[in-house]
Image: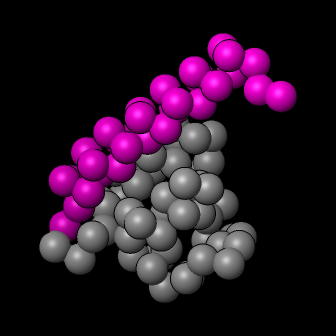
Amino acid sequence: MLHQADFLREVENSLSYRRDEESLIEICDENGCLSEEQAGKLLANHGHTFDEVLEDPYDRDPIKLEARNVEELLLWLGY
């Protein structure tokens, strides 16, 4: 059973993610990709590096990851 504080934290995180996702999409180029600096910042905020993404793409598309596609990076991060 989820404690009320945990539930509220999950809701808050969900809302925060939606705002972050929208702001990331706004700064993408016309192909939906981030600059090196932007992708590095996104990954660093989650405790990762771009090298980690390329070394272990999990089940994500490596070509899109190399291009720093924001949707693919967010999926790699587990969103």
Q: Quadrant of the C terminus?
A: bottom right
Quadrant hosting residue 59: bottom right
Query: Does 33 sit above or below residue 10?
Result: below
Query: Does 59 sit above or below residue 70?
Result: below
User: What residue sits 27% from the left and 70% below the top?
Assistant: 32
- Name the side, left or right, on which 47 lies relative to 40: right
User: What residue sits 19% from the left and 53% below the top?
Assistant: 26
* Residue 78 in the image, given as x and y percentages of width and height: 61, 56
* Residue 46 in the image, given as x and y percentages of width and height: 58, 41
Does the image show residue 50? no
Magenta stretch? 1-29
**Residue found farthest to the top:** 5
User: What residue sits 23% from the left and 61% below the top?
Assistant: 28
Query: Does 29 sit above or below residue 62?
Result: above
Let me know if residue 13 is in the magenta part.
yes
* Residue 74 in the image, given as x and y percentages of width and height: 49, 58
